[in-house]
Image (cartoon, coloured by chain):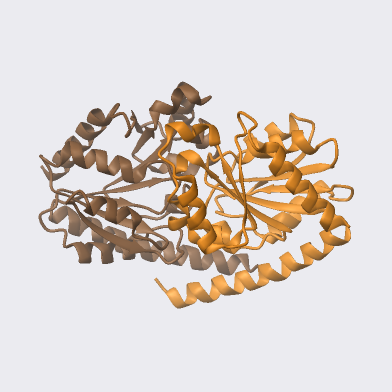
Chain colours: A brown, B orange
Amino acid sequence: MDEVRLIEVKEGILADNKKTAEALKQSLKSKKVFMVNLMASPGSGKTSLILKTIEALRKDLTIGVIEADLDSKVDSEKIAAQGIKAVQLKTGGFCHVDATMVAKGLDAMNPDGFDLIFIENVGNLVCPAEVDTGAALDAVILSVPEGDDKPLKYPVIFAAVDVLVVNKMDFMELCDFNLEAMKERVRALNPGIAIFEVSSRTGQGVEEWSNWLKNKVREYQA
Amino acid sequence: MDEVRLIEVKEGILADNKKTAEALKQSLKSKKVFMVNLMASPGSGKTSLILKTIEALRKDLTIGVIEADLDSKVDSEKIAAQGIKAVQLKTGGFCHVDATMVAKGLDAMNPDGFDLIFIENVGNLVCPAEVDTGAALDAVILSVPEGDDKPLKYPVIFAAVDVLVVNKMDFMELCDFNLEAMKERVRALNPGIAIFEVSSRTGQGVEEWSNWLKNKVREYQA
């Protein structure tokens, strides 16, 4: 493997992406559209959390969703079924979403008039961590069945995000999951991180998380 | 982004890797060492399944483990605590394991005399799917809390593997998981795939999976 060539190309791509992401951020700021990049493992509950958050906030905010998947429309169809505008990006095997893909999704959506747009990133705790999507807020979900050691094993993403949502709290009894130890591991990587404990299934913690998010949107729009 | 350049570099790297992987396969075959590449999402239970399989097979087979993580020794320490030879690869942020990394791990382990070596790949359903590690068998774990739609959303990996282990079967009652629908989705992508249903926690199905794997090792060594 020609590692030097790989690293050069990777750095070039990340630098080009950064420029695209900055332009997106400025454009969205001028339109007062708050974009959230939601990342997590496959199956941690990204789509369900988005649906619960929409349910909590749709009376106050106009919300849209950009769904990204390797090759399916499963998630965008779930969102659209709730009467929410959803655009599906097919990454064609690509392991993360970059700012150019998001720009295409926003073009398809027409973001004017939206208060809040979620990007549901590809299910992957590794690759999306380094790539700026142009979002104003980066969030990661960790679901309880995944285990409390994940911040040790995937430190880059836990260090990079603004907020951690611990999902599937209703599985706590079945799992050997030390919540305090997990939080300590995350805060050692990222002292300023906000942490919420929720269950999309039972509704636990959804109101607190949603209210926090609504305040972030309002601060950004002020 | 210069997509053409990216694709050229990616294809060059995959072609170089394929050569390294083929050389590894020949070398391991001559030594009668059966190597399994185990892939899955973060938290689906790769390490626990390896530990349960070792427990079932250690009286019959000499087993070693190559653990890969972005930047931690959590998993190799769990394996070594059971008196099993374990080597830790730190991928330094890299999202998958390639044949060159595995060759380094094998050098550190000295594979002579082993019957079975597991590679525990980085927790990621996307990137590892396309990269040949030199293993004789490719396996993926899908855990029940992740959801039955994962073959629709991550088709490349389900099409590429020889065997699927459905883990955390003891979570079935808590989850809205349609086992038959999931299997149909997988078999539509990969008609020849072997499928096992296990719970590393309760031990359900571990014997059947372990015996199947032992037979694969013995056929390979014959």
* Residue occupying image coordinates x 13% and y 55%: A31
Q: Is residue A134 visible?
A: no
The x, y position of residue A117, in whole percent, is 22, 51
User: Foreground: A138 or B141?
Assistant: B141
Q: Is residue A126 above or below residue B79?
A: below
The x, y position of residue B68, in whole percent, is 64, 46
* Residue occupying image coordinates x 17% and y 42%: A217
Is residue A203 shown left or right of residue A40? left
Question: Looking at the rendering, which quadrant does residue A15 occupy?
Answer: bottom left
- Residue farthest toward the front in the current orientation of the protein: B180
The x, y position of residue B17, in whole percent, is 67, 67
Is residue A107 shown left or right of residue B189? left
Q: Is residue B120 above or below residue A12?
A: above
User: Foreground: A131 or A175?
Assistant: A175
* Residue occupying image coordinates x 14% and y 42%: A58
* Residue occupying image coordinates x 61% and y 41%: B46
